[in-house]
Image: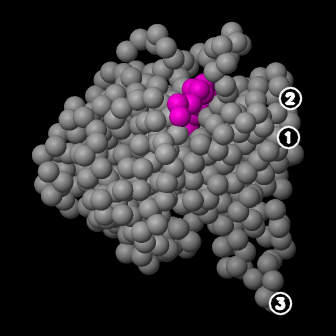
């Protein structure tokens, strides 16, 4: 049974920082210029021949004194992103309007602060315990990033961590909508934060999924993923018709769909049936047809199985003129943060700040057929999307599709 149409949710503010750019303006320029943030990994502690999306512009200054106990690379990534595009100020306004206890937080991540735990294990003391500088229990937990962001934004509402691999921060939007609809909160911060770590790099190398060169999603010569890091945030509120709910962005979450393939521990269903179920539910909630979507941000990891399944789905369901693009060649695969980073790229397209191309991809794999070759756009294009879909298909077939659009009357 398909879900009924949901009330659209407004997005008063959003931001993201990744290897392609810190903040919305830098990201929009990177999209327009097809400027990739991927670079060869140069880390003596992780001697792997691969390319990564590292945020070289990460501020190296310590966190503010009140947040010093949280200091590590992932929390610095989160803090830097929170300072962009007036996002922290927008959350402060929501907090003042409804009260700190009525603003929730849903944060998606795959590895949280595991890099700090890795460092602790590399420097065990003589008794086999963590060294003095790493005895900080609050950082050795999957919920560390959500707890940090909640404190940084002075929020007191419910806060949860979603960890469903690459779909984590996409599913944060779904959780946020349910909280708003049920009246648990009046506003929700949805987020995704992921930092590079040895666990992610060696883990995907062990699975044979990591490329030695920049990733080439959907290319016949694709070799696998390029891992990246990022932090992104969006503020969700009900579209209740109150003048105070009118937003400067004019953008809305129209629908979402979630599913699980239940096919294999690490491989998606070869025809993308679970992903299609997520798409169907997102369309039902939005009251739309697949033909209404004119821009798709593809999951596009550049791994053989994932690209095969997604290409089949796109060719089967979307219109031949849809502008489909795989943006991980710009950002790297930011794992738990991928859903929100790619949602932000959709929101930029809806604002008329450019439709992305598929960086590093030279041509669609002929095995995907002529229809997909027409749908996959290799180069960026000017213009504005009307309805944008963001695909997030996680490890083992954990899927989420988000649909975004403008407010009624927003110019095309």
Mark 3 or 2 closer to N-term? 2
Q: Residues within 10 Å of mark 1 (few under 14, many from 20)?
A: some
Q: Are marks 3 and 2 in contact (CB under 8 Å)?
A: no
- Say which residue appears at 46% left-offset and 36% top-offset: 284
Q: Which residue is mark 3?
A: 127
Q: Which of the 4 image quarters holds residue 387? A: top left
Image x and y of residue 85, in percent:
61, 27
Q: Which residue is mark 2?
A: 99
Question: What residue is drawn where x is 54% and y is 43%?
Answer: 340
Q: CA distance from mark 3 to mark 1?
A: 39 Å
Q: Is residue 264 left or right of residue 8?
A: left
Residue 7 covered by magenta stretch: yes
Residue 343 shows in the view: no
Considering only order in the chain, which callout, 1 or 3, is on the residue closer to the N terminus?
A: 3
Judged by its main secondary structure, the magenta piece is: strand
Q: Residue furthest front?
A: 1
Q: In the structure shown, which secondary structural element does the residue marked by tag 3 occupy?
A: loop
Nearer to the camera, 405 or 83: 405
* Camera sees residue 147: yes
Range of magenta residues: 4-17
Q: Reply above or below: 108 against 174.
A: below
């Amino acid at each position: 049974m398909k879900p009924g149409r949901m009330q659209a949710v407004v997005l008063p503010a959003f931001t993201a920082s990744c290897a392609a750019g810190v903040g919305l303006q830098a990201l929009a320029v990177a999209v327009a210029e097809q400027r990739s943030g991927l670079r060869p990994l140069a880390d003596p502690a992780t001697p792997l021949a691969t390319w990564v999306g590292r945020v070289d512009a990460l501020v190296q200054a310590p966190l503010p004194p009140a947040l010093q106990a949280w200091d590590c690379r992932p929390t610095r990534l989160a803090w830097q992103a929170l300072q962009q595009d007036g996002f922290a100020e927008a959350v402060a306004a929501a907090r003042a309007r409804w009260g700190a206890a009525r603003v929730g937080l849903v944060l998606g991540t795959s590895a949280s602060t595991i890099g700090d735990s890795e460092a602790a294990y590399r420097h065990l003391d003589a008794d086999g315990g963590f060294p003095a500088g790493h005895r900080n229990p609050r950082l050795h937990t999957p919920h560390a990033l959500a707890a940090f962001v909640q404190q940084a934004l002075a929020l007191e509402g419910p806060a949860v961590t979603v960890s469903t691999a690459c779909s984590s921060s996409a599913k944060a939007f779904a959780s946020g909508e349910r909280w708003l609809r049920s009246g648990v909160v009046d506003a929700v911060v949805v987020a995704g934060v992921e930092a590079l770590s040895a666990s992610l790099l060696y883990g995907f190398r062990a699975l044979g999924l990591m490329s030695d060169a920049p990733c080439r999603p959907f290319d016949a010569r694709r070799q696998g993923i390029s891992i990246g890091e990022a932090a992104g945030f969006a503020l969700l509120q009900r579209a209740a018709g109150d003048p105070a709910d009118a937003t400067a962005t004019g953008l809305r979450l129209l629908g979402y769909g979630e599913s699980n393939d239940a096919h294999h521990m690490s491989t998606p269903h070869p025809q993308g049936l679970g992903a299609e179920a997520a798409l169907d539910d997102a369309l039902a909630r939005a009251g739309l047809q697949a033909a209404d979507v004119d821009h798709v941000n593809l999951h596009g990891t550049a791994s053989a199985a994932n690209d095969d399944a997604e290409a089949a789905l796109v060719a089967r369901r979307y219109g031949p003129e849809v502008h489909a693009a795989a943006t991980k060649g710009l950002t790297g695969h930011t794992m738990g943060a991928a859903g929100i980073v790619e949602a932000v790229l959709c929101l930029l397209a809806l604002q008329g700040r450019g439709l992305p191309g598929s960086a590093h991809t030279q041509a669609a794999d002929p095995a995907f057929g002529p229809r997909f070759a027409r749908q996959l756009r290799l180069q960026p294009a000017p213009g504005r999307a009307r309805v944008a879909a963001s695909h997030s298909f996680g490890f083992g077939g954990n899927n989420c599709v988000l649909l975004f659009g403008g407010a009624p009357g927003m110019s095309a």
